[in-house]
Amino acid sequence: MRLLSVNVGRPRPNPWKGLSATGIDKRPVPGPVAVSAPGPKGTGEVGLAGDRVYDVQHHGGVHQAVYAYAREDLDTWQAELDRPLSNGVFGENLTTLGLDVNGALIGERWRIGPEVVLEVACARIPCGTFQGWLERDGWIKRFTQAARPGAYLRVIEPGDISAGDPVEIVHRPDHDVTVALVFRAMTLEPELLPRLLVAEALPPEEKEAARRRSA
């Protein structure tokens, strides 16, 4: 398991949400890249040096510090969409190889390289910017039905990372709540919501939403 690339966003106009800019245009950068815990949501801060978000209401902050997507899932989409998909094109900071990102447990911890430890926090929910960026009508529905969302992570131990760094799973919590399960529960299968409540590392706002919608 390793990082294929570390990707940092280039600001570009965002006509799809009426915002001044978007950071979804992520491109691989030569390492090392510093990783640290950002401030709370609303500041635009994320975990990678040189990157930021512009939709501060919905993105960024402690629980969405870093976004990871598996190269294997990009390859599946590449075949389905019949177009090349470069590392970073889904807006991911980390493109991984050999790591089951969607099967990762909420609260699972990854050591990347010698220094950095990240913790799986929640699933990515697609938005209008993502659909507009890929220029695919109906993309939100298609991405949701596939339930291959990728994972947001929080920073536990800061440091530097580079493409090629090994990824090691150093902790797996004692429950069965995966990234894919959270995504399915939050989107098309609300009957799964009660199962999320055992995941202590789920962000508080998502746990409260699961509790409220399960009542």
Image (cartoon, helix red, strand yellow):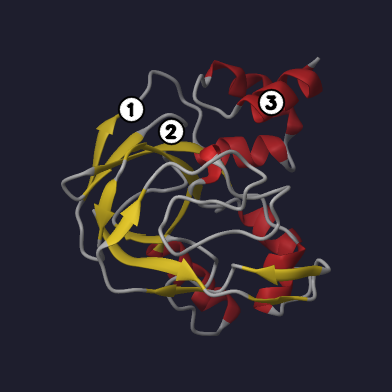
Horizontally, residue 182 falls left or right of residue 179, namely: right
The spot of residue 215 in percent (x, y) is: 81, 14
**Residue at horizontal 54%, vertical 65%?**
91
Mark 1 residue element = loop
Residue that lies at the very extreme toward the left in this rendered image: 114
Give amino acid for label 1: Arg
Question: Who is closer to the viewer here, 163 or 182?
Answer: 163
Q: How far separated are the C-alphas under marks 1 and 2?
A: 7 Å
The quarter holding residue 206 reads top right
At 67% from the left edge and 19% from the top edge, which residue is drawn?
194
- Tag shown at residue 172: 1
Q: Which mark is residue 141?
A: none
Q: Nearer the viewer, residue 205 or 135?
A: 205
Say left or right for 55 vs 51.
right
Task: Report the residue at 55% width, 28% height from top.
Answer: 202
Residue type at mark 3 is Leu
Q: Tell me where residue 203 sits by quadrant.
A: top right
- Residue 105, disc: 2
Residue at image point 79% right, 20% down: 212
Q: Residue 166: image x %, image y %?
A: 19, 53
- Mark 3 vs 1: CB contact within 8 A: no
Q: Amino acid at mark 2?
A: Leu
Tell whether label 2 touches label 1 (CB within 8 Å): yes
Can you identify the residue that label 3 sits on?
193
Position of 129 relative to 147 (above/below): below
